[in-house]
Image (cartoon, rainbow, N blue to C red):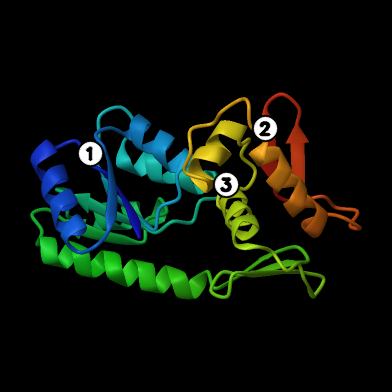
């Protein structure tokens, strides 16, 4: 499982990183809101740990931007602001949990695990129009017909799903679906998008994968 920590206090950031890695999580870190937003926009995370008081874009603003992108990754706020109103603001901004500083590292780990379990249960079945995706079984159906996706095709669909409405470049897709740096000499992205499109959109009036020539792809309903 992959976690993003957006925290500008280096000691806290590193303590969280070390503790989560010791509990078998893979961890990325960012020290400001803008960098955090870039990472969220290009990488799939299981949980985002977000400080409220960040330089540049605040944690609350960053959370709102993430939700406006249609990204439903659970967000755990960490903050020195611990009044009831502060916690309400965090939850209303789109956060899933709020923990005041100072905190126990063990409690952070426990809350992260709880969020991943809860989110997994919520996201087991995802519906977009007549498309139904079973995240647990890694299966997709359109109008009740099993699309019989391969593992890589499902991974590509999952990446599209987590970035609905966002223009995704070929390099972003290659780096996040294949974990490779994009090489302009390969057409692997086009090939697999065509594989997925033939199973997902062929025979349906409404196309879920849109090509923006020279730029990339957009997934979702118009």
Residue tagged by mark 1?
Answer: 53
Residue tagged by mark 3?
Answer: 163
Say if residue 222 shows up in the picture: no
Q: Earlier in the sequence, mark 2 or mark 3?
A: 3
| Image location of residue 134, percent across then percent down | 61, 72
Identify the residue shown where x is 31% and y is 36%: 58
| Image location of residue 16, percent across then percent down | 16, 52
Identify the residue shown where x is 12% and y is 37%: 10
* Count of marks overlaid on the render: 3
| Image location of residue 8, percent across then percent down | 19, 36
Q: CA distance from mark 2 to mark 1?
A: 34 Å
Identify the residue shown where x is 57% and y is 47%: 163
Q: Element at badge 3? A: loop
Q: CA distance from mark 2 to mark 3?
A: 13 Å
The quadrant of the image that shows the N terminus is bottom left
Mark 1 closeness class: few <14, some 14–19, many ≥20 residues within 10 Å: some
Q: Is residue 69 above or below residue 116?
A: above
Q: Element at badge 2? A: strand
Q: CA distance from mark 1 to mark 3?
A: 26 Å
Q: Element at badge 1? A: loop
Mark 3 closeness class: few <14, some 14–19, many ≥20 residues within 10 Å: many
| Image location of residue 148, percent across then percent down | 72, 69
Q: Is residue 125 above or below residue 149?
A: below
- Depth check, mark 2 against mark 3: the one in front is 2
Residue 216 — which label?
Answer: 2
Which is more toward the observer, 139 or 105?
A: 139
- Left/right placement of residue 158 relative to residue 11 reads right
- Left/right placement of residue 155 relative to residue 119 reads right
Q: Is residue 179 above or below residue 128?
A: above
């Amino acid at each position: 499982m992959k976690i993003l920590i957006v925290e500008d206090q280096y000691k806290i950031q590193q303590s969280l990183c070390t503790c989560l890695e010791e509990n078998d999580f893979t961890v990325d870190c960012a020290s400001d809101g803008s960098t955090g937003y870039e990472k969220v926009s290009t990488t799939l995370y299981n949980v985002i740990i977000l400080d409220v008081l960040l330089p540049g874009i605040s944690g609350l603003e960053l959370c709102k931007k993430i939700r406006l992108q249609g990204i439903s990754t659970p967000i755990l706020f960490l903050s020195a602001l611990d009044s009831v109103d502060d916690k309400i603001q965090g939850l209303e901004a789109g956060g899933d949990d709020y923990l005041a500083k100072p905190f126990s590292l063990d409690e952070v780990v426990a809350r992260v695990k709880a969020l991943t379990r809860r989110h997994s249960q919520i996201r087991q079945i995802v519906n977009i129009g007549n498309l139904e995706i079973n995240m647990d079984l890694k299966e997709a159906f359109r109008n009740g017909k099993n699309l019989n996706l391969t593992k890589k095709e499902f991974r590509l669909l999952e990446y599209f799903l987590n970035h609905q409405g966002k223009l995704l470049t070929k390099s972003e897709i290659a780096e996040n679906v294949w974990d490779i740096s994009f090489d302009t000499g390969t057409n692997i992205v086009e090939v697999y998008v065509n594989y997925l499109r033939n199973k997902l959109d062929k025979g349906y009036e409404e196309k879920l994968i849109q090509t923006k020539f020279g730029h990339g792809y957009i997934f979702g309903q118009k």
